[in-house]
C-alpha cells in the first residue's frame, strides 16, 4: 500500500512540473533522482544564453563520504575537527551521529556560515549559507552549499548568483562601504584576491543573512528572491530523494 501511495505521489509530482522549469536528473548507485528546479534557477552547464541579472545558478557534484577525511570533501571544504579527530574513515553513521550532537560538517576559516540539518529515513541533508569575511570583504550575495548524504555518497549542490555585487551597492550601505579608497592596505590587498566591497559594520555577514532570510524590504528583490528560491529548491530536493525510495 505504501509503494502504491508513493507511486501516486510520484506521478502527481511529474504531472505538476512547470514546463518552463528545468529538471536536473542525477544518477548514482543504480538510482535516478529527478529534481525540479524552481523557475529562474538554471544549471551552470546550460546557462550560456541566460541573463545573469534575472537568473540564479545551480551546480552539483558527487563524492564518496570518505572524502570528508581524505580531501576535505573534494578539497572544497575544511572538515570540522570532530570528524577528522575522531574517525579515520567517515561513514553515513558517523555523519548522522555527529550532526545529532550539533557538530557541523564544515569549518571554513574566513567564511561566515549558517547551517541547518535534516534527517530522514535513510538520508540526511546539511544546508549551509556562506559568505566570505576574510579581509572584511563581501563576496557577492553569498552562496548556499547543500549536501545530501545517502549510503556512501555525498551529493553536493551549490546555489549561487553571478550578478556583480556592484549592482546593489546603493541599497547595501547598511552593510558595506562602497568607496574602496577608505580601505586599509591589508584589506585593499585582500580585495584584489576576493572581489567585493568591505563591510561597514561588525558582524555584517550575519546581519545581511538574517535580513535576507526574514525578507527585509530594504533589500533588493533579487537578493530576497535568492533566499526564497533556495527554500523552494531545498523542498524539491527533499521530495526528489524521498520519491526515489
Image (cartoon, grey):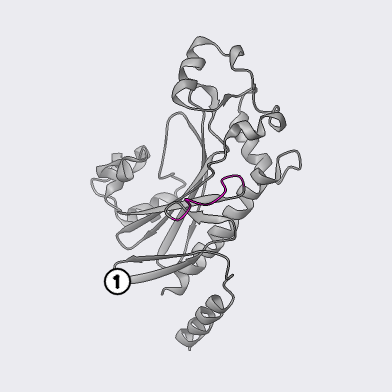
Q: In the rendered structure, which segment of residues is drawn in magenta? A: 46-53
Label 1 belongs to which residue? Answer: 30
Q: Is residue 49 magenta?
A: yes
Vertical position of residue 92 compared to residue 115: above or below: below
Vertical position of residue 197 compared to residue 32: above or below: above
Q: Horizontal and vertical percent for residue 186?
A: 48, 13
Q: Quadrant of residue 124?
A: bottom left
Whether residue 116 is visible? yes
Q: Horizontal and vertical percent for residue 17?
A: 57, 72
Name the quarter where the C terminus is drawn.
bottom left
> Farthest residue in the right direction?
217
The 10 Å Cα crowd at callout 1, few under 14, some 14 to 19, many 20 or more, is few
The foreground one among 62 and 150 is: 62
Whether residue 100 is visible? no
Q: Residue at x 53, y 76 (%)?
A: 14
Q: Secondary structure at mark 1?
A: loop
The foreground one among 164 and 177 is: 164
Q: Residue at x 37, y 71 (%)?
A: 32
The foreground one among 24 and 137 is: 24
Q: Residue at x 70, y 27 (%)?
A: 173
Q: Quadrant of residue 200?
A: top right
Q: How many numbered marks, from 0 up?
A: 1
Amino acid at each position: 500500500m505504501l509503494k502504491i501511495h508513493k507511486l501516486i505521489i510520484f506521478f502527481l509530482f511529474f504531472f505538476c512540473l512547470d514546463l518552463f522549469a528545468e529538471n536536473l536528473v542525477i544518477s548514482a548507485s543504480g538510482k535516478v533522482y529527478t529534481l525540479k528546479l524552481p523557475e529562474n534557477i538554471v544549471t551552470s552547464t546550460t546557462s550560456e544564453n541566460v541573463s545573469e541579472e534575472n537568473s540564479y545558478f545551480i551546480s552539483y557534484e558527487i563524492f564518496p563520504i570518505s572524502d570528508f577525511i581524505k580531501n576535505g570533501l573534494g578539497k572544497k571544504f575544511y572538515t570540522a575537527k570532530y570528524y577528522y579527530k575522531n574517525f579515520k574513515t567517515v561513514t553515513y553513521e558517523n555523519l548522522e551521529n555527529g550532526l545529532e550532537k550539533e557538530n557541523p560538517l564544515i569549518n571554513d576559516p574566513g567564511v561566515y556560515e549558517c547551517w541547518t540539518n535534516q534527517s530522514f529515513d535513510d538520508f540526511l541533508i546539511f544546508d549551509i549559507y556562506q559568505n566570505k569575511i576574510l579581509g572584511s570583504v563581501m563576496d557577492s550575495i553569498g552562496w548556499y552549499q547543500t549536501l545530501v548524504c545517502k549510503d556512501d555518497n555525498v551529493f553536493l549542490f551549490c546555489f549561487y548568483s553571478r550578478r556583480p555585487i556592484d549592482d546593489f551597492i546603493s541599497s547595501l550601505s547598511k552593510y558595506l562601504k562602497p568607496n574602496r579608497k577608505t580601505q586599509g592596505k591589508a584589506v585593499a590587498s585582500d580585495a584584489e584576491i576576493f572581489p567585493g566591497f568591505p563591510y561597514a559594520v561588525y558582524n555584517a555577514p550575519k546581519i545581511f543573512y538574517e535580513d535576507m532570510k526574514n525578507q527585509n524590504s530594504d533589500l533588493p528583490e533579487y537578493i530576497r528572491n535568492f533566499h526564497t528560491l533556495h527554500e523552494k529548491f531545498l523542498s524539491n530536493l527533499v521530495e526528489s530523494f524521498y520519491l526515489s525510495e
